[in-house]
Amino acid sequence: MVRSKELIELFTKIAEKDNRGFFETTLQIINSERDKNHFKLADTLTAILERIQDDSSLIEPWIEEFSKIPLDRDRMIELFQIRTPKVSLNDIILNSHTMKTINKILLEWKERTHLSKYGMNPITKVLFYGPPGCGKTLCASVLAGEMQIPVLEVKTDILVSSLLGETSVNLRKVFESVHSSKRAILFFDEFDSIAKSRLDNQEHGEIRRSVSNLLNFIENAPKNLFIIVATNHPKILDIAVWRRFDETLEFPFPNQQEIKKLIKLKLKNYPNDFLNYDNLVLKLNNLSHADIEHICFDTIKFAILNDIDEITQEIFTKILEEFQEKKKKLKTAIR
């Protein structure tokens, strides 16, 4: 049975109004009882959690926030997490076309009330595509930071269930749980995992039904939601997906001008007056934003840990060469 230590921890979370802590402790107790073959108790506790999820009249104010996060019934894991990003447009480097569209999105969001007077709706559904590490997830956070609303980041790996029909059930749970919530960004990363082409003969009927349901949920999403989806594999998306979005934005590898801006942005907090940026840009071609950030941060850490007052061309080049060697070995290892 439940030990006194677990009960004390559970009631402490309640007293402290620690919603997330209460939730995690409860799941630990359920899993612990199931491991002890106390299936009846575990099932009873699980049923109570599901009642809290389904019946708002049972929800006390201190667990109101937690109650809005639905669970995957099979694994009892939250289907999305809530983030409140503090980043802004100053924290991201994008190409001019993408930045122009982002500014357009933000302007329409700001003037949404004015637009509505003329029967116009602002952009609220956006699809990001491009190679990994090129700013898609960061851009979703930047939009949230600029709009001053939270990001509800859907766990697509949890969303897809091995149980028949559960993927569609999970999708419904996500959209229903945010239907009457305050304004927020609903963000699906790795969107291709749940929106693959229905023409793919290798996909079974369950996936095809889930895609149909997903498209319906997106099309009929409430106005309080701003939906962003991101994919590294746009070619495998269902053809009907593209029509459901107000804007589609490509996030390619940075060009030379963007690489230069990115180096300056990431090294701005450490002296580097004697760097030859133009020379470094040539060496960083064909790397993603994330790769360049990684190299810059490793360079700063190397300087700090070796009591070096200023980043030099030699130090940056040394770190870059080490990064390239690691990447080369990794490619060889996974072939």
Image (cartoon, helix red, strand yellow):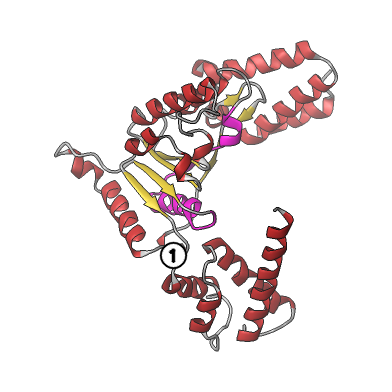
16 or 82, nearer to the observer: 82
Residue 40 place in picture, x, y as percent: 76, 10
Q: Which residues are magenta?
A: 132-160
User: Quarter of the image containing the N terminus?
Assistant: top right
Residue 112 place in picture, x, y as percent: 25, 43
Q: Can the viewer see residue 293?
A: yes
Q: Is residue 327 left or right of residue 181?
A: right
Label 1 crowding class (10 Å Cα cut-off): few <14, some 14-19, many 20+? many
Name the residue beneath numbered marker 1.
Answer: 93
Is residue 272 covered in magenta? no
Name the residue at the top extreme. Answer: 40
Seen in the picture, residue 24 relative to 135 is either above or below; the reply is: above
Image quarter of residue 274? bottom right
Seen in the picture, residue 16 relative to 102 is either above or below; the reply is: above
Seen in the picture, residue 185 relative to 209 is either above or below; the reply is: below
Seen in the picture, residue 6 relative to 291 is either above or below; the reply is: above
198 or 276, nearer to the observer: 198
241 or 141, nearer to the observer: 241
